[in-house]
Image (cartoon, rainbow, N blue to C red):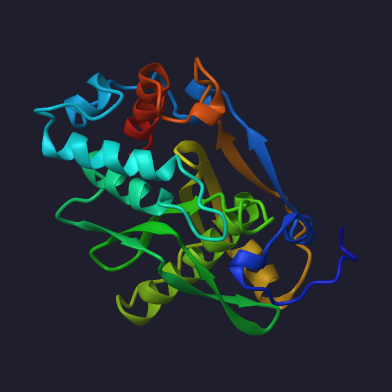
Amino acid sequence: MANIIRLAKWGNDWGFNELDAYNISVAEQEQETFFEGPLPAYTGPAGFLQHENRVQGLDASSLALIKRLDLAMKIMEGEESAVDDFAAELLRSMGYETEETVIRTRKNIRLNMCGEQVHAKTDVCVLDAAFEILLLVQEDKTHINPRDPEPQFIAEAIAAFQSNNAKRVDDLFLDPLQTMVIPGITMTQTFPKFYKIKVTADLDHCVRRGQFPAVQTIVYRHTPRVPRRRSDGMRPLDNRELMLRCYEAFR
């Protein structure tokens, strides 16, 4: 793969060719290995786990989630879906946004690649108080764009590594980190896959200069083994419970 032509590309243009070009592979892990133990109990809005659809008297947080879930399950030809709205609402309801963190949508991150500066655009991300990127969410947009979300997420993770280190050096007067584990989620409607990518200074160096890394980067992924069809997403309550417990473990 060292002979693949490498060009500067925006994050949403990354495909599996870029993963080959930078010696990156994706490996599936079982639930307990990926989350380092059994899944915790769900602690979010109770009504969201008790009711598949809207009912009278539902608490405000559960109602907001179900309304956005309804929209996210509908594919609108030629336009982005409401998946990002659902993902952001779900993260907030489950405590990903705290006094020290904030959830943003459609944040652009600079990506230095092959001697040029391009950008990677997140769908949803979690930032800390210093505006360092803690978590990335990428929607599967294959209904309007044939590109798989995995390479796009990986491009965003490398951009996040660059951005976080730039903030450490320029704003906080700290040394850059040599490695960062960037967690992420890809969403096909309301069905998530969870990822951990260990971005290293060596991978960053090779992306910046368009070189093939000698050491392979392995991105670990977990796909929830839901009891019903994956295409049903979070609509059925038994699917919903398992996926929500995965979100709890990932926080």
224 on left or right of 214: left
From this view, report whether residue 126 is shown above or below residue 226: below
Q: Is residue 82 above or below residue 122?
A: above
Among the 4 quarters of the image, the one containing residue 213: bottom right
* Nearer-the-camera pick, 93 or 26: 93
Which residue is at a point 28% across and 36% down the rendered structure image? Answer: 66
Name of the residue lying farthest toward the right: 3
Q: Residue at x 38, y 36 (%)?
A: 250
Measured as percent of width and height from the top left, residue 94 is found at: 25, 38
**Quadrant position of the N terminus in the picture:** bottom right
Residue at image location 18% in from the left, 51% down from the top: 98
Instruction: Determine whether 23 is above or below 44 in the image.
Output: below
Spot occupied by residue 180 in the image (x, y as percentages of width and height): 48, 55
Q: Quadrant of the C terminus?
A: top left
Is 48 left, or right, of 7 in this rendering? left
Q: Nearer the viewer, residue 198 or 74?
A: 74
